Amino acid sequence: MAGGEDLKLLGTRQSMFTQRVVWALKLKGIEYEFIEEDLVNKSSLLLTLNPVHKKVPVLVHGGKPIIESKIILEYIDETWKERPILPQHPHDRAYARFWAAFIDDKLMEASKKAFALTGDDQVKAIESTVEALQLLEKELHVKKNFGGDEEIGYLDIVAGWIAYWFQFIEEVGGFKVMESAKFPCLDSWTKSFLQVPTITQNLPPPDELRFVFGAIRTATCPK
Amino acid sequence: MSEEVKVLGNWGSCFSRRVELALKIKGVEYEYIEEDVYGNKSPLLLKYNPVHKKVPVLLHNGKPIAESLVIIEYIEETWKGTPILPEDPYEKAMARFWTKFVDEKCLPALWRAVWSPENEREKAVEEACKCLETLQSALNGKRFFGGDTVGLVDIAANFIGFWLRIIQEATGHGDLLSAEKFPTLFKWTDEFVSCSVVKQSLPPRDKLLAFFKARVAEANASK
């Protein structure tokens, strides 16, 4: 099997970014060693491999570190050619990269603010979150997956946090925007995404996420 | 097959000029359409970039691609010839990493430092200088970030290569990028602007300086 002894992944089970890399490796059937990191007491290994950002995930291939989940996904696709996750045509690849950036920049920023803020600031952030979700809803129209394929791909993997982590962001953050009536395409995509065996078998338990998000909210919420 | 390549851009935008530089490196002929980004956005821009309503937008045979870095990856994959990215997947991942660092950390920190009020300036400058120092380390004795020739990271850092020194002249503050503080990065800016293909893709110096002097005057008048 591909990968093997010289492939390691530093991450945490609860991290949506780490799980992206896990899903990609497992979809391609690549063997690797998973190293669970303690993000409160960061290991010297993590600090050596990612001195600039000191974050997970870090993929280490033949001793060389690759950082930033979307960059790691592209690296994995270029290195192991079986079961491609990015589309072949440059225009489709541009589409995937554009929307991946949108999900991680616009939607994530708005969701983070909706999660951490209160009062009018939270209301504004919730509005921005809804606007971003509406744009994604439009893109999913008549498609089973974001990539337009039968099988999940890069953009579905990047969007994966919406299918699972988002509900806990809402729950702990004290807001609710994702309703099946308002976002029928996202709802349908979520259901089919969560039925993919590689995905369901690689999700952190709800209580772990509630705990982690609860701790983050306590630490970051304005008093 | 006759190709139709158009760029919707703005003369002073470093993001827009990134795309023009990438096209010139590849020797691709294109039609340039100037957008007034400060006034009313044209129907063309709103049609081809409805999500962000920003320049640059590349139109290839009528199909739009937005976001400068997504566009550059598209250009690399569509037109062969002088490569913008390394071929090796690890080197490619490193180039993408540094590009992301420029875009998400360096540029916002520099922008904040340039426009920050006096009482916040010291801290903003310190943060921006930390970014520049980290970026400088990526040069690692090379002439360009891309090695012997201009590559993705050089293109992404065009703001630092050209705009920043002009802005420093306009504001009268030289405490961000100087030969004393960052000798190798400073030298890189000279190499960058001397490169003939880069020269062709830069805005006129005097016009840019006048533009920023006017912005500085506006900012001071509103105090």
Image: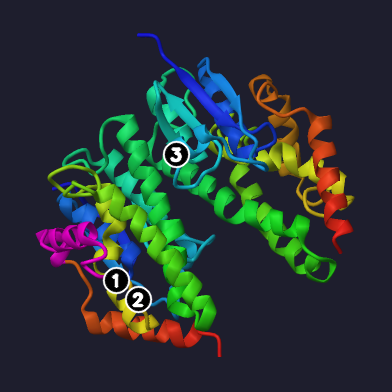
Residue picked out by circle 1: A165
Q: Is residue B64 visible?
A: yes
Quadrant hosting residue A185: bottom left
Q: Chain of mark 3?
A: B
The region drawn magenta spans A178-201
Residue picked out by circle 2: A169
- Contact between labelled residues 1 and 2, with CB atoms less than 8 Å apart: yes
Residue picked out by circle 3: B70
Amino acid type assigned to the residue bearing label 1 in the image: Trp
- Contact between labelled residues 3 and 2, with CB atoms less than 8 Å apart: no
Same chain under badges 2 and 3? The reply is no
Question: Looking at the picture, how far across and down is residue A52, in whole percent?
Answer: 54, 60
Question: Looking at the picture, how far across and down is residue A48, in whole percent?
Answer: 48, 63
Same chain under badges 1 and 3? The reply is no
* In this rendering, position of residue A48 left or right of residue B122: left
Question: Looking at the picture, how far across and down is residue B103, in whole percent?
Answer: 57, 49
Residue A97 on the magenta span: no
In the image, residue A92 sits, relative to residue B24, either above or below, namely: below
Quadrant hosting residue B147: top right
Question: Looking at the picture, how far across and down is residue B151, in whole percent?
Answer: 54, 32
Amino acid type assigned to the residue bearing label 3 in the image: Val
Nearer the observer, B188 or A84: A84
